[in-house]
Image (cartoon, rainbow, N blue to C red):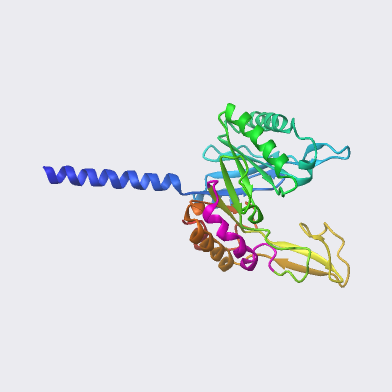
């Protein structure tokens, strides 16, 4: 009888441990397009890889012609949100906005996010995220903005997260509940000589030791996307999102820049060596049909697995 009780207790502990692990290790994706629409390819990818969290870019905040921070490129909802998906509204703020008076921006932004949630039947969200490439000169304003937004969000029962770029790791973390480490956009894509601007471990490695002592809880985002960059006589012209977006002249060069699977896995391993918890949630950038059909199913699983 005693042995049976012990076996039952061990089984229960194993079950609880497994459940705990499943809760800790999650998978997410960014959705950065201006139109939210989940076709069969996207739905299949999310289902096959058990991804139930989407960081959805709601809008950008830019400086308008009058020098005021204003929303721009608001996402259009063509599809409803599937019930099993957790949506984290994400707002990209141009750093120049932090050189302006943003004292009323937290309240305006939160109100706009909540209105969009209601209009598009997103439901109650648990978290919102701010993406801003703040620097030393704008840090004070950005931190003040985040502190006020965090207070307002908390009153609504909403957490606040912030993207963290590699160069920001050595600085004091922003006032947020957690951060998302961006393991991409590591090089200068405007230089023809920079062959790996999206992810180059030679650029990444000098920043990673700061991960060990970083105070903010982190998840990590890894790139799937590629760029087609137009150069003319060696000079940067622009990124070609569609074939007819930029005038391509005879003699122009179109450089394809994309991270390989081995580079993504190397980056993930390097992060784990410094702070394993930062890979408890792996996030992919971003949910786009060309990005989610580049590799085999097992390759995506290898990236997503803890």
Q: Is residue 296 visible?
A: no
Q: Residue at x 39, y 44 (%)?
A: 20
With respect to residue 114, does 136 lie above or below? below
The reply to whether the magenta stretch includes residue 213 is: yes
Q: Is residue 20 visible?
A: yes
Residue 263, x across and y down, in percent? 58, 67
With respect to residue 206, does 22 lie above or below? above
* Side of 11 relative to 34 (left or right): left
* Side of 226 relative to 86 (left or right): right
Per the rendered image, the range of residues in magenta is 196-217
Residue 133, x across and y down, in percent? 71, 49
Q: Report the front residue among 58 and 182.
A: 182
* Residue extending furthest toward the left: 1
* Residue extending furthest toward the top: 155
Q: Residue at x 71, y 41 (%)?
A: 140
Question: Residue 65 sits in which quadrant?
Answer: top right
The reply to whether the magenta stretch includes residue 248 is: no
Residue 269, x across and y down, in percent? 51, 63
Residue 112, x across and y down, in percent? 70, 31
- Location of the N terminus by quadrant is top left
Question: Residue 143 sits in which quadrant?
Answer: top right
Question: Residue 254 sits in which quadrant?
Answer: bottom right
Tag count: 0
Q: Residue at x 87, y 61 (%)?
A: 247
Q: Residue at x 30, y 47 (%)?
A: 14
Q: Report the front residue among 243 and 123.
A: 123
């Amino acid at each position: 009888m005693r042995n049976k009780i012990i076996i039952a207790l061990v089984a229960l502990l194993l079950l609880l441990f497994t459940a705990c692990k499943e809760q800790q290790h999650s998978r997410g994706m960014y959705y950065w397009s201006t139109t939210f629409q989940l076709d069969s390819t996207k739905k299949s990818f999310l289902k096959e890889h058990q991804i139930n969290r989407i960081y959805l870019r709601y809008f950008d905040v830019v400086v308008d012609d009058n020098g005021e921070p204003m929303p721009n490129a608001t996402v259009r909802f063509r599809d409803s949100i599937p019930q099993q998906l957790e949506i984290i509204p994400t707002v990209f703020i141009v750093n120049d906005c932090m050189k302006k008076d943003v004292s009323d921006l937290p309240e305006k932004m939160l109100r706009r996010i909540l209105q969009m949630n209601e209009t598009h039947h997103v439901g109650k969200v648990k978290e919102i995220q701010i993406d801003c490439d703040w620097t030393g000169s704008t840090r004070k304003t950005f931190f003040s903005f985040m502190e006020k937004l965090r207070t307002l969000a908390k009153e609504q029962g909403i957490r606040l997260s912030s993207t963290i770029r590699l160069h920001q790791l050595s600085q004091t973390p922003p006032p947020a509940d957690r951060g998302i480490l961006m393991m991409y956009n590591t090089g200068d894509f405007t230089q023809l000589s920079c062959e790996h601007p999206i992810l180059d471990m030679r650029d990444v490695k000098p920043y990673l030791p700061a991960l060990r002592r970083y105070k903010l809880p982190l998840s990590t985002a890894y790139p799937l996307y590629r760029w087609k960059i137009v150069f003319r006589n060696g000079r940067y012209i622009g990124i070609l999102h569609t074939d007819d977006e930029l005038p391509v002249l005879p003699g122009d060069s179109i450089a394809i820049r994309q991270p390989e699977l081995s580079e993504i896995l190397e980056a993930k391993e390097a992060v784990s060596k410094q702070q394993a918890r930062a890979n408890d949630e792996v996030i992919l950038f971003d949910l786009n049909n060309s990005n989610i059909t580049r590799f085999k199913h097992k390759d995506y699983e290898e990236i997503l697995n803890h």
